[in-house]
Image (cartoon, rainbow, N blue to C red):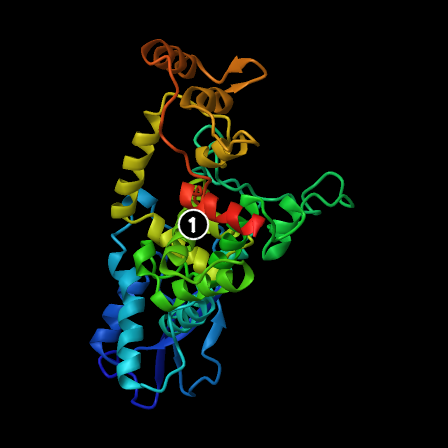
Amino acid sequence: MRSKLGYAARDFLYYKKRCGRDVARLEVIDFDQQTEAMVANGKGERKARLVLTKKQPKEMQVSISPMKHMREKPISDEEEIHDTLDEYKIWLRDLKKEYPETDLKDDFGDHTIETYKEWLNAQGLMEHIVSASEENNNDVDERSTSPKERPSHARRATCTRKDCRQPNKRTSRGTLKGFAAAMKRIRSPVGKNHRSFINEVSVFTRQKDPLIGVRTWSDIDEDVQGSIAADILSRWELKDTMDAKEKILSIANQQYRGWRGTLSATSKAYGRYSEAMKNKPKDVDLVEWHYLYMYFNIPDFKQLSCGKSKCLSNKKSTHLGGSKPFSQNSYEQRDPRTGEEPSDLTLWMSTHMKNGRWSDEISKAVYSSYNDTTGCKSSRLHGRGYPAKRQTLTERMRVEMDEHA
């Protein structure tokens, strides 16, 4: 290539490949293939920046004129990124074949973050991700999601001291992680309250489950799931049986899906990659947020998400029980002497009415219709919520015999 341009073989020819907002890396141009790579990498640039020198530079990373806005394609015009998401797995698989003694893994969350960072560094993408998260937030993005379009369960960016009118006022403590979250909510991470059990399962789920390289719960390694169940069984007085483990993992599955759903809604609230990176949730790592943003914008996920949104939009009645299961509400309203739980009508009224007012007209109509049609209580037994089950007659008799023994 240099001889075609009329330069000596001892000269060094490079081009500047942007790898950040104001940082570039010198890439050698010796062959035609490297010239084609320069053209492909410079599609987003207004000009090509060449460096010709007689001495080989010692520092390959140089400064470059900064961009006011990262020139990105709109999400609707982006190319499909299935290959980009799968390249990480392929790279790790090939690396393990070539170097079986490597310590890189993708089972637990911490291991996955370290491995994904190694892949990003190998691809030269890490600097771009860091620079996108540190970009100035002064300019208003025209494509940012308006408040009306923002999902209701998306997290909102916390106000910092620099942005607030009262700089000395502490406006947020950030997202609580670990057992501090459970202690804040119920004053103790353990207890008879069902929420304490769910909170603790959620804590271990977020500590151990990976977000990178996972599309469904079944993609999580069995060792990770087994570790969650083992930690819960060691802290709670539960029998170490397959039934108990299945119930624990069922709760972990629901909590994991809810966690990813919240992150998906938060990602949807921002129109551009750079804007989303500047508003990263505090309970995820930077590279995890990068991967999730890419995953949440693939066509397959968008199609699945739209289908679920349409199903939720068809819901006509609204209950007032919050996240508490109906089975737990039924258990809490049982008769203290007989242990009998309320009828379906009573349970429906308690979860859809507050201060004598129905949550909506549909809930009121359902109650009236069911009351006029049946006029009697259901014989169906409600559970106590997970993981406990209602005692059978044999079990109750055995308990009474043990008490009188």
- Disc count in the image? 1
Viewer-side residue, 43 vs 20: 20
Residue shown at 43% from the left, 23% from the top? 343
Question: Depth check: 9 or 128 in front?
Answer: 128
Toward which corner of the image does residue 179 lie, by quadrant?
bottom right
- In this rendering, would 187 be left or right of 40? right
Residue on which the image places disc 1: 251
Q: Is residue 43 visible?
A: no
SS label for mark 1 = helix
Residue 351 in sight here: yes
Q: Amino acid at mark 1?
A: Ile
Tell whether 169 sits left or right of 241: right
Pinpoint residue 240: horizontal percent, then vertical percent: 43, 63
- 113 versus 191 height, above or below: below
Q: Report x, y in % for residue 184.
A: 66, 47
The quarter of the rendered structure image containing the N terminus is: bottom left
Between 375 and 1, the residue placed more toward the observer is: 375
Can you give x and y, in whole percent of width and height, for residue 128 in the image?
Answer: 44, 62
Give the residue displayed 33% in from the left and 14% down from the top.
Answer: 374
Image coordinates of residue 295 in percent, x first then y, are 34, 53
